[in-house]
Amino acid sequence: MSPARPGPQRAGEPDAVPYRGVMVQLRDVQGSVVAHATTDAQGQFTVAVPAGTYEIRVDVQRAVLPRCEAVEATVRANQIARVAIICDSGMR
């Protein structure tokens, strides 16, 4: 999630932080939620799903902020797909 703190960024300070403890949803091509996971302390998650194409969304529970982009991921059989989801914290 970025920005990590309000105001101008200072040298040596990270401009982003992990989005911890948030639910991530995987949706099939029809838009149905087929799996979900919760991010860990590093903002990462894992979920086992069949091969296919999925839209991945962060569930912000109807909150205006943060704004998180939905990303598409194609999962191939017996492979790990990696995605990066960008969230705007709204801080300026």
Image (cartoon, rainbow, N blue to C red):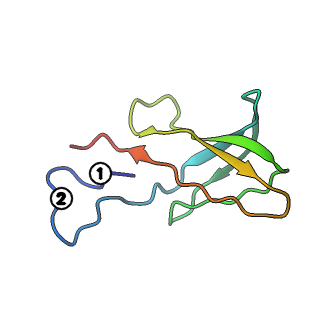
Q: Residue furthest bottom?
A: 12
In screen coordinates, is 19 left or right of 5? Answer: right
Please name whichever residue, 14 or 54, is drawn nearer the observer in this view of the structure.
Answer: 54
- The tag earlier along the polypeptide, 2 or 1, is 1
- Coordinates of residue 70 in the picture (x, y in percent): 55, 38
In screen coordinates, is 55 left or right of 60? Answer: right
**Element type where label 2 sits in the image:** loop
In screen coordinates, is 22 left or right of 64? Answer: right
Q: Which residue is mark 1?
A: 3
- Coordinates of residue 44 in the picture (x, y in percent): 57, 61
**Distance between the Cα atoms at labels 2 and 1?**
9 Å
* Cβ atoms under marks 2 and 1 closer than 8 Å: yes
| Residue at (58% x, 57% y) in the render | 39
**Element type where label 1 sits in the image:** loop
- Residue 46 position (above or below residue 68): below
In screen coordinates, is 70 left or right of 47? Answer: left
Please name whichever residue, 73 or 41, is drawn nearer the observer in this view of the structure.
Answer: 73
- Looking at the rendered structure, the kind of residue marked 1 is Pro
- Coordinates of residue 77 in the picture (x, y in percent): 85, 58
Q: Which residue is mark 2?
A: 9
| Residue at (18% x, 58% y) in the render | 9
Instruction: Pick the quarter of the image with the C terminus.
Output: top left
- Coordinates of residue 28 in the picture (x, y in percent): 76, 35
| Residue at (49% x, 39% y) in the render | 69
